[in-house]
Image (tube, helix red, strand yellow):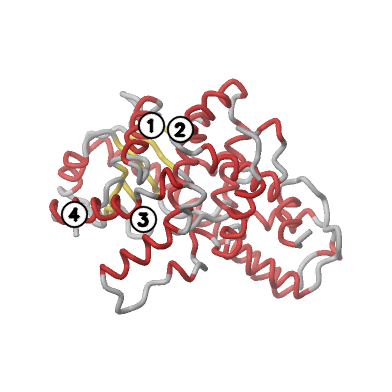
Amino acid sequence: MHPFRNLLLISLGRESSFRKDPTPKDWAVMFRMARQQALIGVCYDGISRIPEHQRPPQDILDSWHRLTEKIAEIHSLHLKRTEEMVPILEKLGFCGCILKGTALSRLYPIPERRMCGDIDVWVAGTHRSILKALRTSYHPFDIVYQECKADFFPDVEVEIHFHPGKMYNPFLNARLQRYLEKETPIRDGETLTMPEPRFDAVYCMAHMFHHYLEGGIGLRQMMDYYYTLRVLDPADRKPVMEALRHLGMGRFTAAMMESLWFNFGLEEEYFLCPRDPKLGRKLMEETISGGNFGVGDRRNYQKADESRLHRYFRKSSRVLSHLSQYPREVIWAPYARLEHYFWRLFLGYL
């Protein structure tokens, strides 16, 4: 067993110590991988559980501790800013819900150990009405189909979602939007809500699927899903899996079950479907080598003088590398990317 995988299992409370005492070189590798996968804080839990003689060298332990403390500080700041979003949304006349990390951190045994990204808020309304309201004070920018950024706070990035996510296949994307609208956590009379596990079990899978095809995902997103499945009502597993198949994500879900089983020891009782070892191995190889959101994947590197056309072909080629595994979605990627470009150009968002 790779020491880092052993550390993940210890951090989740599945094992109490390393099967083989790690060397200083092993700890250097584990520290690098934990940073690359945005799991520094979570893995620090594991370090606190292992016997003294298996702990990392003092210099690595000190660096690990400092980063974990910083993650906790950022988490506290995100909670504060999330609370401050409530009066802002009330002033704008919006109801919304918190998506992804800020909401999912609640599922962790120690929420402040989950590394934060930005704050994602899905608000009810059309993209035109939302942008019109934001332009009064918050200067929206980086406007794309599903979201935009806005200047709410100087120290935390906020993304306002018109749609929680998207798919390349226009028919599957229409199904996804209908499903998310039907299962929406946004409720009249409540300014800011949190999704239920049934919603996240579909939405987070769609989010991971899109990012996996476009640039890559990391173990942090998979760990979010691990905790989502563990709190999902057993009665919801069948309808969730039916929805995922209807949205063309049956094979990806099977690959994800393999990864969750192998990396985190997820029990079969929490599976949504039987695992697929072949697709799962491919998923895990890219996840481990690419890191969080594919930061280490050379196919995602952008040259300083890269033109829009070259970027289009580079990113399309990246997606098309998955054609044999997920043809139903991938075949539409080049057309969807072109359509999205002209949509942004026509509306003046470029």
Q: Nearer the viewer, residue 52 or 251?
A: 251
Callout 3: helix, strand or loop?
Answer: loop
Furthest-top residue in this view? 235
Q: Residue at x 33, y 78 (%)?
A: 304
Whichever of callouts 4 and 2 sits on the residue coming sooner in the sequence is 2
Pair 4/2: label in front: 4
> Can residue 86 be seen?
no
Name the residue beneath numbered marker 4.
Answer: 342
Q: N-terminal of the two: label 3 or label 1?
A: 3
- Secondary element at image label 1: helix
- Cα–Cα span, label 4 and label 1: 25 Å
CB contact under 8 Å: marks 4 and 3: no
Please state the horizontal and vertical placement of residue 150, each as a whole percent of the image.
Answer: 27, 53
Disc number at residue 221? none
Horizontally, is 159 left or right of 79 in the view? left
Determine whether, in the image, residue 214 is placed left or right of residue 232.
left
Does residue 55 appear in the picture of this structure? yes
Q: Nearer the viewer, residue 91 or 240?
A: 240
**Quarter that holds the N terminus:** bottom right
Q: Residue at x 60, y 40 (%)?
A: 254
Q: Which mark is residue 195?
A: 2
- Quarter where residue 69 is shown: bottom right
Q: Using the numbered discs, state the Cα–Cα distance from disc 3 to disc 1 in whole angstroms.
A: 24 Å
The kind of residue on which mark 1 rests is Leu
**First of labels 1, 2 by sequence position:** 1
Q: Reading the chain from its start, which is encountered first: label 3 or label 2?
A: 3
- Per the image, label 2 sits on a secondary structure element best described as loop
User: CB under 8 Å between callouts 1 and 2?
Assistant: no
Q: Real-space Cα distance between discs 4 and 2?
A: 33 Å
